[in-house]
Amino acid sequence: MSLTADNWPIAAALLQFPAVKRDGTVVQDADAAEWLATFREVKDAGFDAVDLTDSWVRAGDLSSARLDELKAAFTEAGLTAPSLSAIRRSVIDAQHGDENLAYSHRTLEAAAQLGQTVVSFGLHQALTPAQKEALWFWTVPGHQDPDPAEHPEVWNAAVTRFRELGKHAEELGLLVSLEMYEDTYLGTGASSARLAEEIGLQNVGINADVGNLVRLHRPIEDYWDIFEAVLPWTNYWHVKGYQRDENAATGLYTSIPTAMESGLINYREVFKLALEHGFQGVIAAESYGGDGLSVSAANQAYLRRQVLPKRDGYALGVSNVTQRASRVS
Amino acid sequence: MSLTADNWPIAAALLQFPAVKRDGTVVQDADAAEWLATFREVKDAGFDAVDLTDSWVRAGDLSSARLDELKAAFTEAGLTAPSLSAIRRSVIDAQHGDENLAYSHRTLEAAAQLGQTVVSFGLHQALTPAQKEALWFWTVPGHQDPDPAEHPEVWNAAVTRFRELGKHAEELGLLVSLEMYEDTYLGTGASSARLAEEIGLQNVGINADVGNLVRLHRPIEDYWDIFEAVLPWTNYWHVKGYQRDENAATGLYTSIPTAMESGLINYREVFKLALEHGFQGVIAAESYGGDGLSVSAANQAYLRRQVLPKRDGYALGVSNVTQRASRVS
Amino acid sequence: MSLTADNWPIAAALLQFPAVKRDGTVVQDADAAEWLATFREVKDAGFDAVDLTDSWVRAGDLSSARLDELKAAFTEAGLTAPSLSAIRRSVIDAQHGDENLAYSHRTLEAAAQLGQTVVSFGLHQALTPAQKEALWFWTVPGHQDPDPAEHPEVWNAAVTRFRELGKHAEELGLLVSLEMYEDTYLGTGASSARLAEEIGLQNVGINADVGNLVRLHRPIEDYWDIFEAVLPWTNYWHVKGYQRDENAATGLYTSIPTAMESGLINYREVFKLALEHGFQGVIAAESYGGDGLSVSAANQAYLRRQVLPKRDGYALGVSNVTQRASRVS
């Protein structure tokens, strides 16, 4: 039975919820009541599912007892938590790669205990000071993965380490998804697809977060070409909207976070392509800037109203990777 | 009886539906089931009416039997098709003018067979290669009609040929509407009104597509002035929204497609002016970029909720041209 | 009993309604039926309350009998009018300060007769010719209040005159709120808070119109810092949304009016901070550009759906100034 607009899992990302609250509360170490309050806010905003974005709480650094509390909290709020996104923890970070790899393994174990379906990793690294100063960090160049032709050992380390994580995830019944992000090996359609192919595991695919790419203040790859390359490998999906304007004659590049319905990417058409490639994975609705949770809720509503198939029984292609929207019981 | 929010015909433009599908299907030659699928998508998006935009299917190039199939398809989908928009088929194109004129006559005949109300023509010509390369074609200069003072013969050809089309349309019980577009004789309020006046037929008016003008990356005519000039002649209306920012000191010009409610043009006030000038014509909801069909649906909802008169019996002015929102039976 | 999403007064600003209509009607002198029509339009757009923005009608310049007509009109339309915003009437205007002060006193008396709760004044002065020429006036520099260190007498005049207005308002049972606006003594968080503190009256606070500041085409103060400074003093609130993009490397600054939900300011979080500082005042929903009334209505709907507390009994801090959302009877 294929997923439809009514039951497709769409999780709220927690990008707007900081690790340290204004009153100094470190959310990681806070009482579970603190977590429950956030989950209730997510539920009230209109969600039935949440992405455990680790910029909020690092499940991988919680004890087993605390993980039970976390699970109890989102369950009590009426949410499921099908996905976990680990952010800026590149396993090929020159300085922190080993540490990030160990953290990623712990995160998989935590996700398994929480009964999750998919864990998303990426190759983007910590924001630079200049990026942190900017209104929007993506307007300032950040870390770049080295050219794989000149540094095959770095590319190979990415393949090897993601494969290692993938095998661990497989033992735990989890999918791994790799988030697209500019200037990394997951920064173009072709490179992302090649990485997934070289890893070569059924449970490791791509998180087609093309929103990360169309917001850049520089010439960009055609978004349709990117999706054609990565949707055959996509097993999880961060979706978000950006408006964009360009003018080659004046050198203008501008992009602004917006609801997906109003953005550059035609998600209506892109989802048709996704279904042709067999996509049946968890979706995480994001939005940067302003009241991202409310915009994420509007994004969910848009997907269910205008984009996702209304009725079961539609034509569905075959993906290169395993598709799973909820945990195998 | 005047039109109200409940029954004003608002047709979905088909700008987002290409003539050739990704799988290579030429929609013009496709089985009627292909057309039905598109019409169903338009209906599902929230529309009861569709504009037969000829960038999708050229009704004027279909046989009579195929036109019957087309009509059966939109009827089966639960749609009416009050309008047809012929795009980039200028009858004064130096190279293709004769061909475009012949095509326009065929299009009128097709529209009559389909039971339509209004056919929209324009003077914009094919996009240049540089326009096709751009993210948004309107950021790059395109074709310009020659100065009518220096080339009165070109202006006169426009008048004569549109008059010829108008007379043909009159015989067929159709209205003709002329779409505003920059750098053509329909590119300013004054020139558009003058063209309509010189044509001098009750059934030939203006398609007040001012969205085409407010998106330009250069100084623009005040939109209110444009509407004051053309609304007395308006008999059909492509509506769409753009946000816009300018800064003379820095040379900034930017414009981004958006839902009409959020855009630069105050459609609430502009429609009051339209009613003062007796407008009672078909509206076509458009939107460029991204999921234009969903944004067009939001545009329709906005018009019905906030802009169009809720109750019959409002004051209505007298138009310079015939107003008709549905076919005279 | 604290205010909740259901009963928090949210008034529509009348920025889109001009003092002189297209047909030449001077609204100030028009028959009350003219006022009723506008109030009905506000009601139809979705509001139960209206801000008597004086760019439409100057209540302070109406006779007592006409004020009764005004009150009868908004009452008949089903609206309350909890607030009045006097715009560009600086009491320290070098040329018109005395006149503006007298007008402000008359405005307070009018507001009292109308049964209002709060009157908003500001220090912004008339738009310059260059500002009036611009698409958006905030892209062009306007009046600047003199440096208070060099011209303490001007700063002191602001304190003294606002205190005088505050005392008059107190006698009338009204609150006074001072609207933030760039390049005035109400142009930064610190300066606004200092002004309120020096005035030193319980019934004089700040109108935290930070939208006025985040739209500027130049570097801006972090909006969160501004709110932290002024929310302890806030007793009335003009809310509106702007999207914003910046790029230091290219010198890009752009801002576009938009619905609050999609804008730069995270009103969800800012309102939490407002409640921590005891805010329980009237809100006025604004929007510049295009169909501002419809966007204001969307802003109201967003606040009630996503931002304002759903249930009574939430934690509420203590404000530095009196909080009142409706007239003390």
Image (tube, coloured by chain):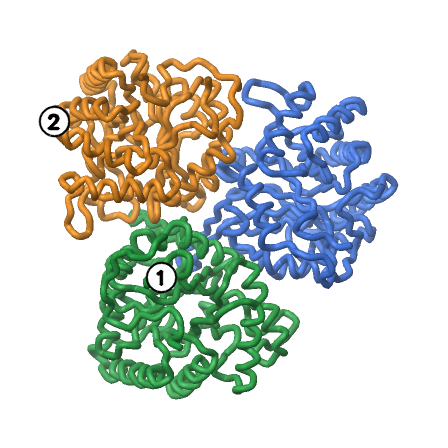
Chain colours: A orange, B blue, C green
| Closer-to-camera residue (C95/C213) | C213
User: Please, what is the three-letter code of the amino acid marked with disc 1?
Assistant: Leu
Q: Does residue A292 appear left or right of residue C199 in this picture? A: right
- Residue behind mark 2: A99
| Closer-to-camera residue (B174/C135) | B174
Q: Tell me: residue A240, above or below residue A151.
A: below
User: Please, what is the three-letter code of the amino acid marked with disc 2?
Assistant: Glu
Specify the quadrant of the image occupied by residue C279: bottom left
Residue B39 on image: x %, y %: 64, 30
Residue C227 on image: x %, y %: 27, 61
Q: In this rendering, does residue B1 appear at all?
A: yes
Residue drawn at 46 percent across, 82 percent down = C113
Residue A227 on image: x %, y %: 42, 25
Dot 2 and dot 1 residues touching (CB under 8 Å):
no
Q: In this rendering, does residue A94 appear at all?
A: no
Mark 2 vs mark 1, foreground winner is: 1
Q: Which mark is residue C3?
A: 1
